[in-house]
Image: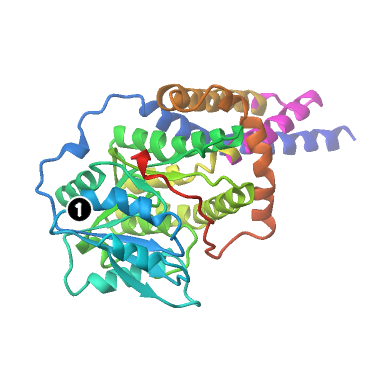
Amino acid sequence: MVLSNHLAFLVINILLIAIALGLFVPVAVLFIECTAALLPSRSKIGNVQTPRPRTAVLVPAHNEESGISATLQTLVPQLTERDRLIVIADNCTDRTAEIARTFGATAIERQDLERRGKGYALDYGLQFIEADPPDVVVVVDADCIVHQETIEQITRVTAALGQPVQATYLMAQPANPSPKDSVSALAFMVKNLVRLRGLARLGLPCLLTGTGMAFPWSVIREAPLASGNIVEDMQLGLDLAIAGYTTVFCSEAKVTGLLPQQQQVAKGQRTRWEHGHLQTLLTQVPQLLKASLSQKRFDLFALALDMCVPPLSLLVMLWLAATGLALLAGALGATWIPGVLLGIEGLLLLLSIVTAWAKFGRADLPVQALLAVPFYILWKIPLYLAFLVRPQTKWIRTQRDAVDASES
């Protein structure tokens, strides 16, 4: 009986230590990225003096008549006579194409109910401009605000470096935000600004985040875009990185979307983003590690580590569950080593979130947003349980709220 209990505790100890060490990797990566974001910038990437390249702006759109006007209002003034604005009205049943033409955009219409999604729309747009290719291709979603000089900055940088460039992509809160909206905006800021800024300060590449992206024509024309991947931008960034074209973060450029006001719509949007993130994490991290070894490239290893960080709420949820198990096991007689490790990880998590908020989000997000974090995590539990039972694999368009062009 004594031997049996000893073996049981040994197994429990090994399992809990393995869990604690496994969680240490994403927690440490998050902490390093958030801490590095506080470092001063050595150079202003957005201020390169390369001549403005001839640019084609592609705007994939599916039934976006409610918000595309605001997007185009912020885009058109940033274009020169040498640039082209192409709206891809993809499987639209509304006035998206008609509205786009009133702004002087070239609207091309695509109908293919079997092959749906942003990847297919972008591939169609690239085929359209292939006969007279630009120097740089910019991709902007049809539901966001492109802030002043963003197109100028990202096109110059990508022309100078010959690499993809990602602008800062943040989410604005709706008119009457709930605490959940504030936490969601905070999580989005940590993912798309703080962590990317930290990687840039360390001289490392980042992932594409979905809109405000610029590519050299020679790079994007060879990219495998035609797919229904629900996080096609993240996958595109990984494919290009492995091919030798890592993404550069241009924090000076900025694009802003709007969090959905309706709870069911917000849930659907988060489900697509986070299920896609988790699927990509599970399938692509091994590919990145393999490519890092075969190509002897540290930048791919750094991307693999960055990919290992799950959505922030899920990371906190996993840490809470592991900590609860470690404390219970310790109280029953198991070793306290996992509890100590998880305690250190909890401190690093707390420092990462609070530091990111204090430096980058305090002006826009009240301190009450931090107090709402536990409720936000509870709201996300069904989303992650759904991933275990029936993960979302097909692209589903998020319903839109009206976009306000005055935000730029």
Position of residue 340 relative to residue 83, above or below, is above
Position of residue 224 relative to residue 18, above or below, is below
- Which quadrant: the C terminus? top left
Mark 1, residue position: 79
Position of residue 186 relative to residue 257, above or below, is above
Return the x and y of residue 303 as percentages of the image width and height. Answer: 39, 46
Total numbered labels placed on residues in the image:
1
Image-quadrant location for residue 233 = bottom left
Out of 224 and 253, give the one closest to the viewer: 253
Return the x and y of residue 143 as percentages of the image width and height. Answer: 42, 53
Characterize the local packing of mark 1: few (<14), some (14-19) or many (20 or more) Cα atoms within 10 angstroms: some
Q: Is residue 265 left or right of residue 152?
A: right
Q: Main secondary structure of the magenta part?
A: helix
Return the x and y of residue 399 as percentages of the image width and height. Answer: 54, 56
Label 1: state its secondary structure. loop
Q: Is residue 85 left or right of residue 313?
A: left
